[in-house]
Image (cartoon, grey):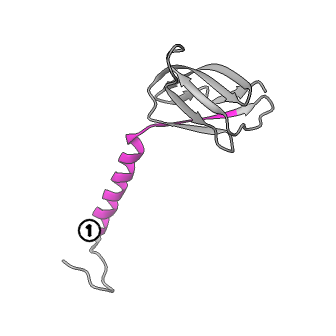
Amino acid sequence: MSLRAGKTMPPTRTVATLCLGLLIIWISAYAQQQVRGRVINRNGIPQAGCQIEFSGNPNAPPTYSITSNNDGWFFLNNPQQGTYTVRVRQGQQQYTVTVTIDDRGLHPSTLVVSW
C-alpha cells in the first residue's frame, strides 16, 4: 500500500512503527552504561577543568582519563565495574580518593576536593 499526499498511514502500521522506534530507543539506552560523577570543593562549588584519572592498578597507566565540565560533571561510558584509585588534578592541586563502580553507578559519585 502506497501513501499519497494527504493520506495517513493505517493505524496498525502507525502502531507498529511507533513500537519499533520505542524498542530501538530502549535498546540503545541499555546497550551502554554511562556513569557520572561531579567534582566540588569543600564549599560546594563545582570545579571545572579538573583532570580526573581512574586507575585500577596504581602501578599502571590510568584506565580512564577525563576532564570535568563547567559544572564539575564528568561522564564515563561503559566503564568496567570494580574499585579504582581516582586522582583529581587542577593546576598544582591534587586529590586522591578510592571509588567503586558497580551496576548502580559510581560510589561516591561526588568527589569533594580539599581546595
Residue 58 lies left or right of residue 18; in this view the side is: right
Q: Residue furthest top?
A: 59
Rendered residue at 55%/31% (across/down):
65
Crowding at dot 1, Cα within 10 Å, few <14 / some 14-19 / many 20+, comes out as: few
Residue 49 lies left or right of residue 60; in this view the side is: right
Query: Label 1 belongs to which residue?
Result: 13
Amino acid identity at mark 1: Arg
In which quadrant of the rendered view does residue 46 lie?
top right
Residue 58 versus residue 39 in the image, above or below: above
In which quadrant of the rendered view does residue 71 lie?
top right
Rendered residue at 67%/38% (across/down):
49
Place of residue 86 in the rendered image (x, y in percent of width and height, measured from the top left): 60, 23
Q: Residue furthest left?
A: 1
| Secondary element at image label 1 | helix
Q: Report the quarter where the C terminus lies.
A: top right
Q: Is residue 30 magenta?
A: yes
Place of residue 6 in the rendered image (x, y in percent of width and height, measured from the top left): 33, 86
- Nearer to me, 62 or 86: 62
User: Magenta part mainly helix, strand or loop?
Assistant: helix
Give the magenta-colored segment's residue range.
Answer: 14-39
Q: Is residue 5 magenta?
A: no
- Nearer to me, 29 or 54: 54
Q: How many callouts does the rendering have?
A: 1
Place of residue 44 in the rendered image (x, y in percent of width and height, measured from the top left): 77, 34
Q: Residue furthest right?
A: 43
Rendered residue at 37%/55% (across/down):
22
Q: Report the quarter where the N terminus lies.
A: bottom left
Place of residue 15 in the rendered image (x, y in percent of width and height, measured from the top left): 31, 64
Residue 17 lies left or right of residue 55; in this view the side is: left
